[in-house]
Image: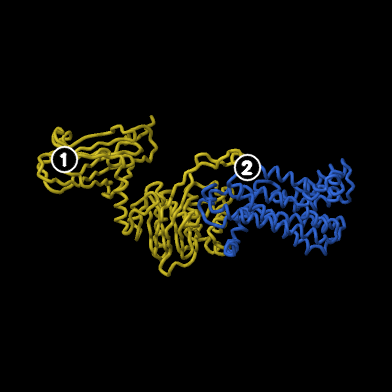
Chain colours: A blue, B yellow
Amino acid sequence: MLSRIKELYEYRDLLVTMAMKELKLQYRNSVLGFFWSLLNPLLMMLIFTFVFANVFKFNIKDFPIFILCGLFPWNFFNGSLVGATGSIVANSNLIKKVYFPREILPLASVLANLINFLLSIVVLFLFLIVYGHNFYVFIPLLLVIIFIETILIAGAALLLSSLNVYYRDIQYIVGVGLLAIFYATPVIYQLSMVEKSSLMMRRPYLMYIYKLNPMVWMITVYRELLYENRWPTLKMFLYAITGAVILLIIGYTVFHRLQPRFAEEV
Amino acid sequence: MAVNTGIPGDNIAIKVDDLWKKFFIYHERHQTLKETVLSMRRARYEEIWGLHGIDLEVGKGQTFGIIGENGSGKSTLLKVIARILQPDRGDVSTNGRISALLELGAGFHPDLTGRENIYLNGAILRLSKKEISERFDRIVDFAELERFIDTPVKNYSSGMYMRLGFAIAINVDPDILLVDEVLAVGDEAFQRKCLDKIKHFKQAGGTILFVTHEVDVVKQICDRAVMLDSGKIVSQGDPKQVVRDYHDAVLTTEKGEEGGTKEIEIKRVELLNDEGTRTTRYAAGDRMIIRIHYEAKKPIEDPVFGLGVFDQRDAKCFGTNTELRQYETGRVTGKGVAEFDLKSLSMLDGKYTLTLAIHSSLSASIYHWQERYYSFEVYNDYRDEGNLFIPLDFKLKPDK
């Protein structure tokens, strides 16, 4: 295990080069190029704001900020997993012809999306400043939660990319699954709205299941820090870390169980 | 199980120890969850042992050739050594940095420029960014792509693509180079350039493991060789001897039959090309010399030497003998050599078998016959169609 990590470290240049390749290719031949990765969530923000603040009359202040604080971390999760799941199958020509640590492929996808995410955070800061949110003291904690989310995503990426080599359905399931998780995560609504909903009141066990989703705690922490501008509770952090570490262990174990026969199966 | 990169001893570059590799041939494959869940039994498959307890030692600075027919396991062996495939049993240990030329330009991305692909491919071959920058000019120079280096490689010709792939792999400055058939591609000038570069690498003390069909190259550049058959080593040692064994194995078919009184016996047969080297692969229109080493137990008057060529469907393409062609053989005693010199093989691509016979005039008694005992292959560079290869010229004379 330690030697694997050491080897991964020796291949770090490949990880970065692969991630940069993905970013370069993503917007090649489009006029606005890289700006799409910022423009896209901003347009989504406009749509959600229109629908929820204006049509459904959600009573949430600074609704655009509220949405962006959830949407950017969500897009990091969503984009990474969509990219990573097919990454090994899509690079079958490489897998069959060259040796390198196979983890590089899904992880490069995660890294590319992380870079996108960090840039979008900068844009988010501009919005926060304009809306007069006082978030500066929370920046160190923000970096911690970004790190934790990255671990969570890396675990899921390893798991899904290796399973997809054996069962190609995974890439289709991921599409629908992500949509389900999107609604099971407080991205476009508040956690308190779920807690107070009549369904959860009547069936409290549903709330336990809901809270098993680590993304609930990720998004909640982001929102506490950037939108509410207050310290998240220790419980939220522990939930998030536990979920991330468990997923990384599962993902890593499954990946290494399946990895030896990748070159024969892709 | 594990492939260690430990140090197997100072003078050894690659050590392969009792290596076994199993493949699964699926009869019905579950590639979706639904199939796995719905079918009550497991996927049906057969196990095939691709490698059968291979032991191998390649010394530092050696050029080592691996030959064998298709499916003999030679590429599998190379891939296990390159760590692309994992063995089921046994160990591979290597000493030094490995670069594998398994497929030139594997991993090139068509939308990236030549420059970007050099950095990407270099990183795949474990070079740091700095190391690639140091080698960048050398790579571009070798590939002769100065003018096109900022063009996406999808616009490259296949030759340019190959040149760039080779240039990157060879300039990794590996200690051990694994080469698989890659020299069979590209134009002749490029092949020569690659071969030169490999010879340079060899002179500089690099170790090369070389898998190929072109056994003549093995004779030219290898210090040692092995021949694989069905995943086992069947011959090893001096490349000349191994290549000879290879030819004998390829030449002899499995379904051949033989018989006769053996008063004159066909001891050994060689197929030669125009340059007098042994081969079983000919281009359409090539010259083929069939050299028969015979031995007569007692003096025989005017024996007739005959031959027949059959195609894959066992239809006779051609047959003749020395009597039909009115060659006198006279009194034959002891050992000797009889040669048919076929000036031009007038057939198109395919596998052919050869029947040889020595008999008396009008086949009154048959001394020795070997029915479809030997095989050879014809390929055709022009992709002509039909059964026959007819050499031709073409002229165009427009009216003035």
Q: Which mark is residue B261?
A: 1
Q: Name the foreground residue: B54 vs A231.
A: B54
Disc 2 element = loop
Which chain is indicated by disc 2? A
Q: Name the foreground residue: A107 vs B367.
A: B367
Q: Is residue A104 above or below residue B381?
A: below
State the CA–CA distance, disc 2 to disc 1: 67 Å
Q: Which mark is residue A169?
A: 2
| Neighbour tally class for label 1: few under 14, some 14-19, many 20 plus, Cα within 10 Å | few
Q: Are marks 2 and 1 on the same chain?
A: no
Residue visible at 54% across and 53% down in the picture: A260
Disc 1 element = loop
Q: Name the foreground residue: B174 vs A140.
A: A140
Count of picture labels: 2
Amino acid at circle 2:
Asp
Which chain is indicated by disc 1? B
Horizontal relation, residue A8 to residue B285: left or right:
right
Identify the image quadrant of residue B358.
top left
User: What is the x, y in percent for residue B238?
Assistant: 31, 59
User: What is the x, y in percent for residue A257?
Assistant: 58, 54
Q: Which mark is residue A189?
A: none
Query: Can the viewer see residue B369?
Result: yes
User: What is the x, y in percent for residue A31?
Assistant: 69, 46
Q: Where the N terminus of chain A falls, by quadrant? A: bottom right
Amino acid at circle 1:
Thr
Horizontal relation, residue B56 to residue B354: left or right:
right
Query: Can the viewer see residue B190?
Result: no
Horizontal relation, residue B47 to residue A66: left or right:
left
* Mark 2 in CB contact with mark 1 (< 8 angstroms): no
